[in-house]
Amino acid sequence: MNATDTIVNAALLGTAAKEFVPNDGELPAFLQEAFARLRSETAGADPEEVLYRMGALVFACQRAGTEPEAADESLSAIEPAAEEEEGTTYFSRDFGQMLEHLCANKHYGLLEYAYRRAMEWGGKRLIPPAYLPDLFRKAYADEYTMYQNFQRMLWTLAGRRGVWLRKQMGYDAENEGEEEEMWKTASLKVRKHMLYRLRKTQPDKALALLQSDWKEQTVEHREHLVTCLGTGLSVADEPFLQMVAEKDRSDSVRKAAQKLLLSLPDSQLIRESADMLRGKLRYQEKTGWEYEPLEYTPQLKTLGLQYHATVLRNASILQQLAEHQLPILHCELIERMPLDFWAELLDRSPEEAAELLVRKPPFDLFNNTDFFEQNKEFEKAPNLMGRNRFSIENNQVSVTIHTDEDYAFIGIATSEYTRESYEVKTHFSPIKAIFRFNDARWARYIIQANLKKKLTSQLIQFMTPEELEEFDCRDIHMGILLSDLADDQPWGPKLSTRIVEQLIKQKKDFNTDKIDTMAPRIHRSIIPLLNRTLANKQTSKQIAESCQKLKEGLELRDEIDRLVALP
Amino acid sequence: MDEAAQARRQTQRHKNVMQGIDDLQVWLKDLLRNGLLQVPERADKLFEGMARRMVDAQAPGLAGRLRALGEMDFTGESWKALLTERLGKLWLLTEAYRHLERRSEAWQCEIRTLIGYPQTKEEVLAGEAVADRWMVLHKRVRRVDQLKVESYWLYGERSGRMAVYLEFLAPKKIPEMSLVPGDFYDGELCFYSGVGSLRALFRSHQRVGEGGFVPAACSGLEEAAARYRAAVGENPFIDEVPTVVDGLRLAEDGTRSWVVDAEGKRFPVRIREEIRIPLLVTTGGKPFRGFLLADEEGWELLSIWNQPNDEFYCWRDERD
């Protein structure tokens, strides 16, 4: 115990409990002598006075002996960041301040744009380090933007100092060989970010990290982490995903794995689904699509058919539906099929198959009420809310089918009081399959055929800038349109004008997200339109504010262009 | 007439202060008799009453010390030693005032100032001035109730002297001087009387556009510690000892930060959380020259010069 501890303990205890008299050895000799002198000089003084004076002396001595501690192996200075590559310089402070401004004001669309423009320097110019911390914090704070491509641009633009700084800030490291160490103690959010990043460059390594402690993860973590394999998904992931889809304890985790397997056109799950459909489906030029009923077997369950779990639980209901030739199971299976399956089934080229599937889609059944009206099993029920209804009654179950524009709703009454319902698409659409497989080839065939605007309009992100420029987007919901337009493509003048005109016509303000999406891409030729709208006295306050904000967004874009202009 | 009136006021003030000190010492004895263990539970109210008594006794310096005790951080274990030390100093100060006549003139001035006797601006500016080129090393803004207190630390190029300039601002009041950290001013500083006093006022000042300098620095932490020991040895009541130290690097052990010098000597250091990352970003982990303030709680890093080009960095420092 050192001298100050002796004083402190006495003070904490209080002199009423015990008068301060240091024991031998509690104080160094010179302080012991000082205490003795103090006692004799202040004979009759209160014990409190003695303790205060002694305390002041002891602490003063401690201060007078202040020394730095010696070097110790347990503590070493933070290793400095590696030097940047020779020839690398920094962007101006103005650019750093611009990034700071965009980040602080949540102009994330323009922030991404700024990063993209800065990347044109090929890594020879970096963001000044002083501005990195806030940009990094934003990169890790927001669940959604974490997975945006612009984060990867930020890591490149931050240089080697950025790699070092992220480590100091407690975020993951880019350094080879450090991922395993980081993984062990990383939070879920950081793990997801690591997987997302690694899946783009080293997908095998990401998979290995995921597998390293898979069984120790909670259900919630497993569900989140397995979804990360959707980035850079390939056949190499199939064995792990198949294992999870078959054996995981959690239904939600199994479904998440199955969903990914369905995105692999050559996966075992797709092949088995295709095997089940082959022979049950035919196309004849003159008569169109024909199909054979699908029988319920346990294999259907293992194929993970989602929609009809209710039905699958009850084999008799399934049997009833099969007897009435309702193609419930067929519908879900065919939506899984890749383009090559159809090309083989139809004995056509993939391009011809894609076109035929649009002109003559299979299972336009529910959309065609003739089937129900001609089938004596079905009774026409009174219309409900303008929808066609047909029903089958038997002693145990009633099935009522509502046909609507896009969906048929099948309701099953399993008892007098219990009713379950689910929906089936009334017609086949290749859209789900195209997006699931990210099949740009299939999308391009449909766009070029241009047979159904409603279908084509869902494939905007696959259109070339020239096609977009000529595409009439006026009927499309603006929110959907803006989210579908590709991230890094500038818009032409016609598309830009149509979009702004449509927004103004809707008479709703363009919310901040829309402006943030538009500002990096919209063509400057819309500025006169914005100015006219602002000058028009009949323009509502909200629209005027939105137009003004869009103009300001364009000004920011111009400033970004100026700050990063290549020589 | 004025002198006589002043003398009477001084005499009355001394009487008031002595009565205040009598009450304070009784209170301090009661506190220690009962022990300090229960102080944290009562801290928010315990010291305020006696602080107000000191204000009534015309001893605002003592009131300030009592209020500072009430505002201590009572989490963790470090409060025990700090509170004991500060109470001991408070006792010592009251005893020193009781026996003022035994002290030197400089010490009499120092003790009166610590008690709360003001030194007027005119008195200070009438004293000897130190003409130099002064660099503003740091600015701290504290809010005390309605008052804003701006503290500026200064360093004189030729004299090598440190100084502290204070501005007290009521709401809406405009500061007399707007010093900017990192800027240089040619001027004359007049120091307050006392023992080792750093507080000063500008008799004249002119901002310098060019011709800045980097303050001379201690070569390492041993030299810095020696300066600290000398300062507290000269005046144990000193609150803060400013130093500039060369060749420092940061280290962290998971619970706190350290500064390590080129010899591997180290001190634990306080770095405000909001500047820790900017500090790391700026230095990139490389050695830097740092402006440190040592007080009873340890060392605090406030500003740096980033080497090798000695670019100065200072961060906003605002506290309630």
Image (cartoon, rainbow, N blue to C red):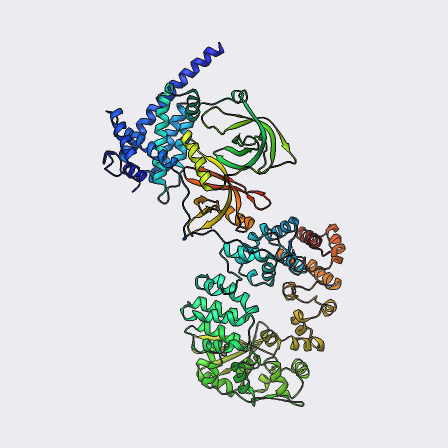
Location of residue A275 in the rendering, given as x and y in whole percent from the top left corner? 54, 87
Q: Position of residue B279 (x, y in %)?
A: 53, 47
Quick one: which residue is furthest to the top in this view?
B1
Q: How many marks?
A: 0
Q: Position of residue A167 (x, y in %)?
A: 51, 57
Residue A281 can be seen, yes or no: yes
In the depicted view, which residue is nearer to us: A370 or A290?
A290
Q: Residue at x 48, y 74 (%)?
A: A255
Left or right: A162 in relation to A506: left
In the figure, residue A185 lies in which quadrant? bottom left
What is the x, y in percent for residue A288?
64, 87
Q: Depth check: A309 or A345 in front? A: A345
Residue B219's place in the image compared with A286, above or below, is above
- Residue B202 found in image quarter: top right
Q: Is residue B176 visible?
A: no
What residue is rendered at 47% in x and 69% in y? A210
Give above or below for A238 relative to A552: below
